[in-house]
Structures are given as structure tokens and as C-alpha cells.
Amino acid sequence: MKTNRTSEKGQAIVFLVIGLIVFLGFVGLAIDGGRAYSDRRYAQNAADAAALAAAGTIALELENRVVTYGAFDCNSANVIAAEGIGISAAITRAAANEYTITGPTSDWNGVELDCGERDYGYIDKLITVTVRIEDTTETAFAHLLFPNALEIRTEAVAWVRPPMPLVYGNAVVALNPAECSGGSNGSGFDGDVDLTVVGGGIWSNGCLFGNGGPVVSVEPPEAGTHYQYTKQGGIGGTFIPTPETTTITLPPDMWAVPAPDCTGRTFTADEIEDLASPNSGSPTDGLHGLYCLEPGTGDIRVNSSSPKTYFVGYEVTIYVSGNNQDIVLTGGKVVLSPPLSDASGDEGIPGLTIYIDPSATGSDLEITGNNESSLSGTILVPGGTVDIGGTADFAAFESQVIGWNVTLHGNGQGNVVFNENQQYRKPASIELAR
């Protein structure tokens, strides 16, 4: 006689075994996933470190070889040599993290360099360093499901820029982005002046204007130096070549300069005036080194009707950080030149002649020179107005002029000569792009 069994004993064991397998699978995948994530993070850190090692080494080599923005050429021996040393640094750093990469290659496990320019309206010169690292992750469970080992691929990109003058080497720069307002905002030229800008361009974030019939030329146009503005331009006067429009506004990092250390170098306005005019005859000394204007001590002011009719400084940096403190040098002999190296003494800033801090509200600069006057070095007034001019035979004007609003004026023919070696230069820089 057949007996039907209705008991369900033992069926739970089947579900328990299946559940345990699934559970162990999830545990295994979690362990393998965590290991893969950890390995990928380590490989990415190694790629970043190798890219930065290459970029830092190249930047240092560009500094040591004095490869500046103006002299930057991807085919030059100095740039090629710097790139070769940078590649070796990347390979060494990767090896220190137990990865083997090769020299220039577009494949994985290698370092690749790309030297060139980017035209944003201004020309950005840079070397791009790309490091790629490939690796595999040992797994405890995933290899049962996937026939191939888990592969990890990481990429790091760093940029290297050579030492460069502020605002990409433009000679006359107005930072005010406002629309033209009666010929006052931005970069302007006043009077019956025939002015030629040599070795750098003219840039205005806002307006470009002329009052009184000036003729303003940039030479040589074939070198890529030209007028740029973002709002309106070419109002009044004659501009050669024709101004070009752009939607670019120069960002603050293109003209940022650290404040100097004023320890032991702070002077009142009267003290600076006296030191710049040491006697009643022709100056035999003048300013030298760093001079920080003490806040609240008034303006630095010399004019043709005052007892002091000249203002002289050699290898000098004048720094203003106080509000409502102007520098007004009008109607006399004005001779100013910047330190050209850190060895100039008294901690002057190489290439920087006058610096009115952007935090110094209401502090402006006005200079009117005569036929004995000369200016060189960078004049930086990012938060204020700059007004510079003089007689028809203003002796020498070899400065880079940067201000919130900038006006150059005069009568007769004159030149603004931009010489990169006499201007403030930002050091070579690196950036981890991704």
C-alpha cells in the first residue's frame, strides 16, 4: 500500500543554502569592489603625483633657463630640455609608487606632453602633461563571474605656464568692465597725441576711447598685438589697427601681485617726498628699494609750484595700501625705475615700480612729466584711476600700465615701449587640471 507523505521538513535547508550562496556572493562582491576602489584611488593618486612632479620640474627648469612668456617657443632647445627632465621626473615618481610608465606615448602607462598656445583673445602659452596608469586588481570572487581580471585605468593632466608678465604682456590695460560713459570708463587717450605702443597690446575690459583727436597705433600688428575691448570701443580719435571685439574679461589672477613685506620700510608721505627730492638742485640720490606709504599720512604730492619740483627713484617700488591716498607727480622731473632682481636691496619688488593695492579704495595715480622725465617698470593700480602724460618730448616711457581706468595724455609724438625684462613677472606656475 502506497503512503503519501505530506511533511515539508527539509525544504528550508534548500532556501537557506541558496540564500547563503547569494549572501556570500554579495559579500565577495563588496570585498572585491572595495579592493578595486582602493586600488583605483591609489593609482589615481600615483598618476596625479607623477603629473605634478613633471609639471613642477618643468616649471623650475623654465625659471632656471629664463624661458619667459615672450621668449617661449615649443621648438627651442631650452623648452625641449625642460620637457625631457620633466618626463624623467614623472617616471621616477611613478616608480616610487610601484608603477612603471614609459616616455612620450598616447597609450596607457605613459607620460605625454603637449606644448602650444590657446587663443582666448589673449594668448595662453602652456605645456600640458598627461600621465596615464593602467593596473589590475586581484579579486576573491569576481573572477568566478568575469573571465578577465578587473582593469583600472587612471589619467592625470597638469598644466605648466612659463614666467609671464601681468595680463599676458599687454602694455596698457584698463580693468573696468563698465560701458562707455562720456568717454571715462576703461582705457582712454586724451589730447593731440600721436602715440605708438611697441611690444605689447592695449586691452580694455570695457571701453576704449579718445578725446581731442589722438592717433594711437600698436606695432607691429603682425605680431598679434592689438586692441581688445569687451563693451564698446574706438569712440573718438584714430586707432590703428581697428579695435577688435572680444567677450573675454581678464580674471583677477592675471594681475594679482602679493603685498610686499613692509617691515621696516614704512614711511609717511612727507618722508617719501623728502627722500625723492634730497636737495634743491639736481638729485644725487633719490629713492631706492621698497617704500610703503603709511596709511593716514596724506598724499605723495610733488608739482611745479611746490618747493620740490622733481621726484626721483632708482630700483624702487612704491606701495600704497591706505584708503584715499593718491600719488600726484605733476609739472616737474619724474624719474622712476624698478628693481630688476631680488638683489637690488631693501626688498623692492622686481619689475614693479608703483603698486596701489586693490583694497586701497579712492587711491589714484597721476603723473605728468617733462623732457627730463622717464618711467619704466610695471605701474599697477587695479582699484583706482591712472592718468599719465607729459610734454611732447617726454624722454622715456617704458612701463606697463594697469589700472581700473587708465588715461594717457599729451601733445605731440610719443611711444609706450613694453620691455618684458623690465616689467613685473609672475613666476612659472603649475595647475592640476584633472
Image: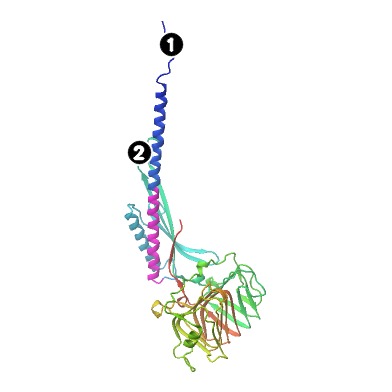
Residue 62 shown in magenta:
yes
Examine the residues drawn in magenta and state their main secondary structure.
helix
Q: Quadrant of the C terminus?
A: bottom left
Q: Crowding at label 1, few (<14), some or many (≥20) Cα neighbours within 10 Å?
A: few
x 40%, y 34%: residue: 25
Q: Crowding at label 2, few (<14), some or many (≥20) Cα neighbours within 10 Å?
A: few
Q: Position of residue 243 (x, y in %)?
A: 61, 71
Q: Which residues are magenta?
A: 40-66
Kindly indicate the quadrant of the structure image that contains residue 35: top left
Q: Secondary structure at mark 1?
A: loop
Left/right of residue 8 with respect to residue 390 in the rendered view = left
Kindly indicate the quadrant of the structure image that contains residue 393: bottom right
Q: Can residue 267 be seen? A: yes
Question: Which residue corresponds to mark 1?
Answer: 4
Q: Can residue 104 be seen? A: no
Q: Position of residue 340 (x, y in %)?
A: 43, 78
The residue lying furthest to the top in this view is 1
Observer-nearest of 236 and 242: 236
Q: Position of residue 109 (x, y in %)?
A: 37, 52
x 54%, y 92%: residue: 307
Q: Quadrant of the N terminus?
A: top left
Q: Secondary structure at mark 2?
A: loop
Question: Which residue corresponds to mark 2?
Answer: 140
Q: Position of residue 229 (x, y in %)?
A: 60, 69
Left/right of residue 75 with respect to residue 213 in the rendered view = left
Give the spatial CA distance, label 2 vs label 1.
46 Å
Which amino acid lies under the numbered mark 1 shown in the image of this protein?
Asn
